[in-house]
Amino acid sequence: MTAEVEPPVRPTLEDVAAVAGVSRATVSRVINGATTVDPALRTVVEEAVATTGYVPNRAARSLVTRRTDSVALVISERERRPVSEPFAGRMFSDPYFGRVVSGLLEVLRPAGIQMVLMLADDETSRNQLLSYLRHGHVDGVVLVTSHADDPLPHLLQETRLPAVLAGRPPRPSSLAYVEVDQQAGARLAADHLAALGRRRIGTISGPQDRPAGQVRLAGFLEALATHGIEDVACAEGDFTHLGGAAAMRRLLEEQPGLDGVFIASDLMALGALPVLQRAGRDVPSDVAVVGFDDSSAAAACDPPLTTVRQPVEEMAAEMARLLLKQIGGPGGPSPSVVFPPTLVRRRSA
């Protein structure tokens, strides 16, 4: 007959208190992150925690603090997308999303906050998301949405959960947001092409049902007009590699003699440059090309892409800081933050 082995007894708050020589209440305040504990006393308690091997009961702690120490990164996409292009596949192939995750983790990880990735691309997934949020599984939300008619910003506002948007909402909202100055970035591209003496200029815009696509196109055309260039060929793209290639072919059909192109994302430029080269147009001597993002796709282009940099990692880190500030205590609405763009010159223009 085999004797039953009793499971090891987990150290308790009382055990930590006995080793530290303090009260159980003091240990509890230290473990729950109270800021009113004397630093020297905090050090003694933390050393006692390490000595005893005490592990906090997160479920019990959540009942006291009403905190889960986790936040959700919600990626929202419109429902109308090609069946051959699954939402998750497109997301993970776009450098932008990886840069957002990297910037968020830079702030969340040292704060001991876990991040949950959630996707919402139809009504069913939206309802599941809202149910998850309303049941208190996370302390706050960072929302990345790409289309102007997305109902999630409004629905998030109704939950009263701390939330920060990646990008200015298309409609008035009390939610804080972080973005780059899209119009100023497009203006940098236009000014650079004009300064190079390019006059037969075209553009591959982003999707015109997305705020970023709309603002970058409008800013580019307005800036060119100040240089006396108003006849600008435009082909709408979709912020993807394949979409950039298809738009470049259409643009060359409309204006085969163009000598400058602004492409509203580096990923589209990665698809567009080979199309120019196959058409016998050398970059940059025949056609100067400027992109937007300064992502890993810019360095992968041949030649390396001159582009407008939006500091995505820094922007995402700021989103995390704004969210943690909201979670940390009551107060007025967090201020929104707009980052300035810069032009990064490489060999394409």
Image (tube, rainbow, N blue to C red):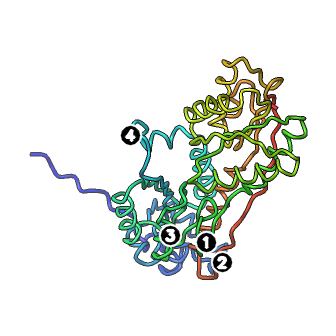
Mark 2 or 4, nearer chain start: 2
Mark 1 vs mark 3, CA separation in Å: 13 Å
Q: Secondary structure at mark 2?
A: loop
Q: Mark 2 — residue?
A: 38
Marks 2 and 1 close (CB-CB < 8 Å) = yes
What's under tag 4, amino acid-wise?
A: Val
Mark 2 vs mark 3, CA separation in Å: 18 Å
Quick one: label 4, few (<14), some, or many (20+) residues within 10 Å?
Answer: few
Mark 4 vs mark 1, CA separation in Å: 56 Å
- The quadrant in which the N terminus is found is top left
Residue drawn at point x = 79 percent, y = 53 percent: 222
Q: Nearer the viewer, mark 2 or mark 3?
A: 2
Residue toward you, 29 or 8: 29
Q: Mark 4 — residue?
A: 83
In-image side of 290 versus 327 (left or right): right
Measuring from the top left, give residue 233's x and y in whole percent. 71, 39
The circle drawn on residue 187 is none
Quick one: label 2, few (<14), some, or many (20+) residues within 10 Å?
Answer: few
Q: Mark 1 — residue?
A: 42
